[in-house]
Structures are given as structure tokens and as C-alpha cells.
Image (tube, rainbow, N blue to C red):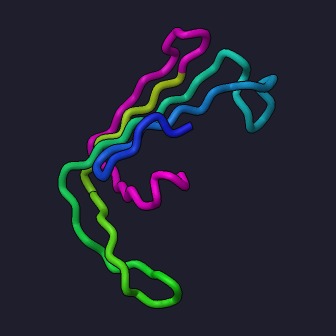
Amino acid sequence: TIDSFTEDSVCISIVGRGSGGKDSLKKGELVRVRAFRESVGLLMAPQTGSMDRRIGESIDAEIHVEFLRDGKALYEGKTLNSGLEIVGDRNEL
């Protein structure tokens, strides 16, 4: 789920509902990703077949990742040098 979404940040949570198979989280497990950007460069991007749109991209975004099981943090990590584009209609996402 998308917990928050702004022009400069996004926070998503993935909640486990399954048995923890190869590509799923177990019930009680949670992955949370929070990303923030400050500086933004405008890049050309395609829209309906032509490069008429500009989107903002950062190359120095800060990204935090947490993995929790039953509310207990098993992993926490962050990076300060990530690329980040935040694009899309908030209502559709």
C-alpha cells in the first residue's frame, strides 16, 4: 500500500498475508520503504510516443528500508546516494 506520496517523498508498506513462499511475505511480516529527495533535475520523458514531458529525477535521494516480523525490526538500512523518480497520478497509484 502507499502510505504517503508527495512530490518529494514516498512511503510504501508491503504486508505479509501468505505462508512465506518463494515470492511472498509471511503473515505478520512487513517491509516498509521510505524515499526522500531534495535536489531534482528535469529529464525529458515520453508521453504518447513523443518526448514532450519533463519529469523530476534525483541522484542523491535518501532511501530507508525496514523489515519487521510481528512488530520487531529484523533489518533496517538506508542509503544516501540513490536515484529516485516520483511520477504518476496519486489517485491512480
Magenta: predominant secondary structure element? strand
Residue at horizontal 38 percent and vertical 59 percent from the top:
85
Residue at horizontal 61 percent and vertical 9 percent from the top:
70
**In the figure, residue 11 lies in which quadrant?**
top left
Residue 25 location, x and y as percent? 70, 28
Quarter of the image for the N terminus: give it: top right
Residue that extends furthest to the front in the rendered view of this protein: 91
Residue 23 location, x and y as percent? 74, 38
Q: Is residue 15 above or below residue 72?
A: below
Q: Is residue 16 above or below residue 90?
A: above
Q: Which residues are magenta?
A: 68-93
- Between 72 and 46, which is closer to the camera in this rendering? 46
Residue 26 relative to residue 6: left or right? right
Residue 88 relative to residue 22: left or right? left
Q: Is residue 54 magenta?
A: no
Residue at horizontal 35 percent and vertical 33 percent from the top:
78
Residue 53 location, x and y as percent? 36, 79
- Between 21 and 18, which is closer to the camera in this rendering? 18
Q: Is residue 12 above or below residue 56?
A: above
**In the figure, residue 92 lies in which quadrant?**
bottom right
Residue that extends furthest to the left in the rendered view of this protein: 39
Residue 87 location, x and y as percent? 42, 60
Q: Is residue 86 magenta?
A: yes
Residue that extends furthest to the bottom in the rendered view of this protein: 50
Q: Is residue 86 above or below residue 2?
A: below
Report how many numbered discs are placed on residues in the image. 0
Residue 55 relative to residue 40: left or right? right
Residue at horizontal 78 percent and vertical 35 percent from the top:
22
